[in-house]
Amino acid sequence: MAETLTSGPVDPANWSCPAPLRDQRVVLSGHGGGGALSAELVAEVFVPAYGNEVLAGLGDSAAVTLGGARLAFSTDSYVVRPLFFPGGCIGDLAVNGTVNDLAMSGARPAYLSCAFILEEGTALDVVGEVARAIGSAAAAAGVTVATGDTKVVESGHGDGVYITTSGVGVIPDGVDIRPRRAAPGDVVLVSGPVGQHGVAVLSVREGLEFGGEVVSDTAALGGLVEAMLAVTKDLHVLRDPTRGGVAAALNEIASASGTGVRLSERAVPVPDAVAAACGFLGLDPLYVANEGRLVAFVPREHADAVLAAMRAHPLGAGAAIVGECVAEHPGMVVAATGLGGTRVVDLPLGEQLPRIC
């Protein structure tokens, strides 16, 4: 048997392939990807620094009580490249993303703040077009941009336009939507075809065509959530599968609730052009970002009625049941494949497609 110079016999059972650069104490692109690196950054740096009961929920938005009212509060930053893509731009993305984070708590979004970081030399016409997109998206979502800020960085130290939006909304009485409420027996639904946003951005960035234009699904989901809550306020979990896609969203919910998720790959709606793009590029559509879709964990007795309400809404016309929450394999997501096997759908390390939101 071969031996190393220092450690004696080699045991193949102990071999492993370490994640690239995982142990380097510097910020990597993957830290912003919504996967395992992002989770580690939050757990090891931010939670210890900020630690409080509100933050501990780690939902899309924080539920807080102020003056007797239950509010949802959220913030997000947008660094998408390119600034404009089929179906939208960084402006409406910034509005819809924060509105959706609030809606995932069941809140009715009300007010946003909007901060611009502009790179010196960026055309004012570009800034104006982005600003108009923000105004139009806010009006469509029924929210008011109530305050904001602008900073400028030197040429070469930005990427044209970065945007940070924060938002606040009111959570109706009787609504308690959070990741820890997922329970065995819950039915898992998605509101429509997945993967369109990530592929739309990539197609423009890299100049690729996949048998037809793929258009981003970016949209504000507040109205869809209201339609679901009209069926029952007992929705357990809502999550918009942005960075890291459906796979990351399901893993985060499984981990937070201590339950397992059993997914049916064939049941997940994937547009043909997205499937073709993912096949060509070696990507998994479950990990591709969305900006106008949601994942819902709904008690089984309400699932059919909620699904019908989703399909009756324009933003849920393609809704489908894709799996269930189970007691087995707690904290893990397992998918039944089209070939009759099963596979673990793990939390991605970083992101397959960087700078898509």
Image (spheres, rainbow, N blue to C red):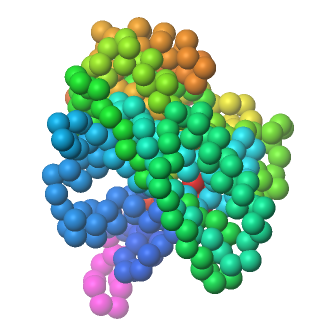
Q: Would you say residue 336 is visible in this rendering?
A: no
Q: Tell me which segment is drawn in magenta.
A: 1-13
Q: Nearer the viewer, residue 347 or 164?
A: 164
- Residue at 39 percent across and 31 percent down: it is 108
Q: Is residue 7 magenta?
A: yes
Q: Is residue 120 above or below residue 233?
A: below
Q: Nearer the viewer, residue 89 or 184?
A: 89
Is the N terminus in the top left, top right, bottom left or bottom right quadrant?
bottom left
- Residue at 47 percent across and 50 percent down: it is 146
Side of 94 where 183 appears, left or right: left
Q: Is residue 22 magenta?
A: no
Q: Quadrant of residue 5?
A: bottom left
Q: Position of residue 300 (x, y in %)?
A: 31, 14
Q: Position of residue 305 (x, y in %)?
A: 41, 8
- Residue at 50 percent across and 59 percent down: it is 148
Q: Would you say residue 308 is visible in this rendering?
A: yes
Is the C terminus in the top left, top right, bottom left or bottom right quadrant?
bottom right
- Residue at 54 percent across and 34 percent down: it is 141
Q: Is residue 180 above or below residue 12?
A: above
Q: Nearer the viewer, residue 87 or 247?
A: 87
